[in-house]
Structure formats: structure tokens, C-alpha cells
Amino acid sequence: MQASRWQKFEISIFSKMSQLAQTYQAVNLGQGFPDFDGPQQIKEAAIQAIKSNKNQYAPSFGILELRKAIADRQKDNFSLDYNPQDEVTVFSGGTEAIFCTIVGLCQAGDEVITFEPFYDSYPAATMLSGAVLKTVSLKAPNWSFDIAELKAAITPKTKLLLLNTPNNPTGKVFKREELVQIAQLAKDHDFYVMTDEVYEELVYTPARHIPIATLPGMKERTILVSSTSKTFSMTGWKIGYAMAPAALTKAIRIPHQFTVFCSATPLQYGMITALRLSYEYYHLLRDEYAERRVALYNLLIDQGFQCLMPEGTYFIVANHKNLLDIPDNEFAIWLTKEVGVACIPVSAFYADPEKASATSRYVRFGFCKDLQTIAAAAEKFKANMKPALAKHPK
Ligand code: PMP
């Protein structure tokens, strides 16, 4: 009954691991959403909008006031100028912005390149567009890429490169030198770059987030996607956005118009308040995440995982080879059932998860959790890890 084009896609591992976490009452450090809410005044603004009858369709491309707030923040943060009228669009989450970018720009005969591991919506959107997805590997442990491999992936059919920085799942923040290399190839071979910057505010000193659109000659060929989900700890509102030159913006607005049409009106009003918050909010957000990052890192190192302190995002990728040398998907299930802590196997972020899991010994933990949740995971590890390891038939 299912159309054959979807056959190689599965129900997402995030849903599966959350289900398993629930069944075994495990502390869920798997799925990447905060277990705390964003600021109260954002909620109040949305409630106010509902009460004052702002409950009908919004303009398809987003409430203008919100588009202005998005453009203002981009200008303040990165000196990037986008016209809210025809260069800024509001989507239902970064995921929809990514989807509309790929299906709006690509078609059969085109090729799309992305770095692997990648956010799992990229292959599905590329498949629907009719284009072919090619991958270039980010190599553990520091997730660098080989420029020769990237060059080899480029052909005259290359239409779009998908770049995710700060990167989920690795926590890598692409460095200026790396971005300069990618930008040069985009200009030399005339392809577009979609940058997924939804973790732009979750970058820890001394790392710095650099939008590739700020590099010379890149703004005109970049679609910059971001979202309020992580920045304001409101992942359930699904308010994302994209910024791009007018011609590209027009191309990505069409699929949006015919699928979602417009994002939830009162929630857009809420996010106007969010985007107008002062710099103190962002400092506090980062400080709190920095504390959670250290807490989770210390916990994982204490337990015998090997991991690098991530430069960005709210994820730590940890190597479990020294604990149990089994495929990462088996390890994630074992850890959830036997220890009571849920995580995500990194092989789930590869084009062929089954093949990747045979060699991958990496799992992803999220620190988008209260310190108490991280402490609860620590308790589970302390109580259950040693006995569980002792009884595992290695
Ligand atoms: N890109 C990446 C890399 C992500 O991790 C996510 C959220 N998991 C998104 C995009 C989409 O975010 P949203 O749709 O919630 O805005």
C-alpha cells in the first residue's frame, strides 16, 4: 500500500528510542528536546494573541512584524541584511524550511551533497525532489572532512550543498577555513548552499558560529535556515524561518504555500516577543547550557566513554567501544534496557544505518535537560552500569 519511493525510510529512531525509554522507565537523553520551557513572556504573548482573536490564517510567508524581527536580529548578530518583504519567510519549523528549500530548488537529474552524519530529514526531502543525495564523511573523532572527498563528490549536476553548523549529531562548529573552502567550491562550480543553523545560539567559547552567507560572494547563493525551536526552548511550536535573496526566496515559498500555507498565527505573535528579547537572554541561555554540557561530559567520561567536549549544539557524541564493543544500535537498546539511560545510535544519521552500525561505536546523548535529569541519569549509571556490564556476554 505504501508508495515504493518511501520503502527505504523507517519510523524515526527518535520515536523508537523514546518509546523504549518509556517502556523501561529510562532517563531519556535520546530525543533532542529540552525538558524545560522557554521564557514566560513568550507564552504570554501567544496567549494574548489567542485572546485578542488573532486566530485566523496568517500571511503565507509569515507575519511581517515577525519577518522584520528575524531580519533585525540577523543584522545585529552577523551584519547580514535581508529584506523582510521578499527575502525572509516563516516556516513550520526548520524542518519545513529545509524541505521547501530542497523541493523548491531541486529536481530529477540534480545532485545534492551533504556531510555525513546528517540530520535525518535531508534524505527524505531530497528523494521527494527527485534529486540524488551524495555524502561526504565527517571523520571521527574530531569530525573533520577531506576536501578531496568533497571535490570528488561535485559534478556538473551538483545543484545544492546542505551544510549543518553547529552540527547535529557531532557538536562540530565549522571553522572559518573550512567554510572558505566550501564557499570557493560553491562559487567555482556554481551551486547553492543551504545552511541549517538551527543551533546558532548554542555555541560555546572559544568556538564561534560563522554563517557561510557572511563570506564574500556567498549571500547570493545561500539559503540560510534557522528556527526558534532551540533558541527559545519551544520545540513544539515549530516556528522556523529561512533567509535568501528574492529569487531563491520565491522558489522556496511556493512549496510552502501549497503544503502548510502558513504557520500557526498566535505562535508567530509569541515569537515576535522572543526575537525582540535583549542580549541578556542569549547569555543566560548559553551559560545554562555550558553548565549542563560540563555535567554530562564529566558523567560520560567517569563512566568510561570516550568523548570530545562539543563546540556547539546540545549533544555529546560518545564512543562506547571500551565499554562494550558491539554495534551502536545494539548498545543504545542495551543501555536503555539494562542501565536505564536512553541515547541515539549515531549510525541513524547515516545514509545506510544498518551498514554504518556494523562499525559505528558512537551514541548521542542530549544535554538539553535540567541538571536534575542529568543527575538522575548519573544515578542510573552508578547503580546499574557495572552489574549490567558484568552480565553482558562480551
Ligand atoms: N536541523 C537540525 C540539525 C535539527 O537538529 C533540527 C531539530 N531536531 C532541525 C533542523 C529542525 O528543527 P525544527 O523543525 O524544530 O525547527
Image (tube, grey):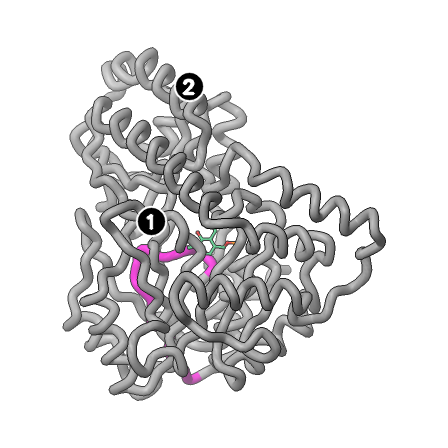
The mark found on residue 71 in the picture is none
Element type at mark 2 = helix
Residue 251 pos. (x, y %): 55, 81
User: What amino acid is at disc 1?
Assistant: Val
Tell which tag, 2 or 1, sits nearer the viewer: 1
Residue 42 pos. (x, y %): 63, 45
The residue where tag 1 is placed is 203
Name the residue at 54% across, 77% down.
Answer: 83
Residue 51 pos. (x, y %): 83, 47
Along the line of sight, the residue nearer the viewer: 175 or 259: 175
Query: Does residue 361 appear to the left or right of 290 in the view shown?
Result: left
135 in the magenta segment: no
Q: Residues within 10 Å of mark 1 (few under 14, many from 20)?
A: many
The residue where tag 2 is placed is 376
Residue 15 pos. (x, y %): 52, 41
Name the residue at 56% across, 72% down.
Answer: 88
Q: How many marks?
A: 2
